[in-house]
Image: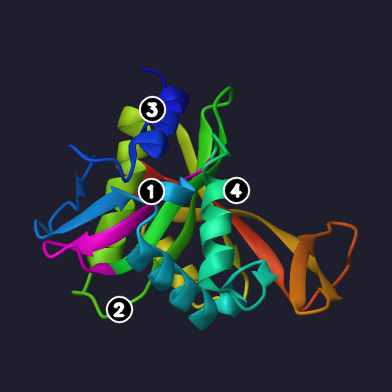
């Protein structure tokens, strides 16, 4: 099965009765990555609530800044994540199915065999090293099952998580200035390489797996 077909199948099946994909976090046998159900009628209300709460907690870590609500989150899952074959979102949970964070893949170019880690958020206190192990598990799954050869990540230049990604073997490839657009109740940071200076930049990285 091709990677694009697998992503579509996982999103269509998530939340239905029966067996579900669980990715065991390497080195942490009591923690798993589970695809987030994105269809409106199959969504997990606890997941939606957690996504909303954590999105608001770390609002300045995203390119779009707004106040999330459960309704906005549910609509985003259904109309954006579900409909986009270049994206899939996973919840990190323990054996009791208690959500503790989330992460996903985005910007997948199936022709170029390229994709990026996206929306890596720690929502609760976790064992040391768990988030690193979970991201490595997801990246290795993307390489092995989706056949994505090159993986990257984009991080805001003022985000302390830059150190986290570098320790995982991500190598900076370029920095793009960001332009701040403000409208009612919304701030959007847009890449604009014509700017000579900016208060923030988007730092692009590539994962060098052999260096991990």
Q: In this view, does 144 lie above or below 120?
A: above
Instruction: Give the spatial CA distance, label 4 vs label 3.
Output: 18 Å
Ranked by sequence position, the earlier of labels 1 and 3 is 3
Ranked by sequence position, the earlier of labels 4 and 2 is 4
What residue is shown at x 68% (from left), y 68% (from top)?
A: 64
**Where is residue 202 shown, x and y percent of the image?**
67, 63
In the shown orientation, is residue 95 left or right of residue 32? Answer: left
Ranked by sequence position, the earlier of labels 4 and 1 is 1
Residue 124: assigned label? 2
The magenta segment is: 87-99
Q: Is residue 136 above or below residue 199?
A: above
Give the structural element (helix, strand or loop) at label 4: helix
Q: Does the magenta stretch include residue 66?
A: no
Give the structural element (helix, strand or loop) at label 1: helix
Q: Name the residue under label 4.
A: 80
Ranked by sequence position, the earlier of labels 4 and 3 is 3
């Amino acid at each position: 099965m091709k990677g694009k077909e697998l992503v579509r199948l996982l999103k269509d099946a998530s939340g239905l009765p029966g067996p579900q994909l669980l990715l065991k976090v390497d080195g942490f046998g009591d923690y798993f990555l589970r695809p987030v159900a994105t269809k409106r009628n199959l969504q997990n209300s606890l997941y939606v609530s957690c996504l909303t709460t954590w999105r608001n907690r770390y609002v300045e870590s995203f390119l779009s800044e707004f106040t999330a609500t459960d309704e906005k989150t549910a609509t985003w899952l259904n109309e954006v994540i579900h409909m986009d074959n270049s994206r899939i979102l996973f919840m990190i949970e323990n054996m009791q199915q208690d959500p503790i964070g989330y992460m996903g893949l985005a910007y997948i170019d199936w022709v170029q065999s390229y994709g990026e880690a996206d929306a890596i958020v720690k929502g609760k206190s976790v064992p040391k090293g768990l988030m690193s192990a979970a991201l490595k598990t997801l990246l290795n799954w993307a390489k092995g099952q989706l056949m994505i050869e090159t993986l990257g990540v984009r991080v805001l230049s003022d985000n302390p998580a830059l150190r986290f990604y570098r320790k995982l073997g991500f190598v900076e490839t370029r920095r793009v200035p960001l332009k701040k657009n403000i409208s009612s109740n919304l701030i959007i940071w847009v890449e604009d390489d014509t700017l000579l200076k900016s208060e923030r930049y988007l730092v692009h990285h590539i994962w060098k797996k052999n260096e991990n």
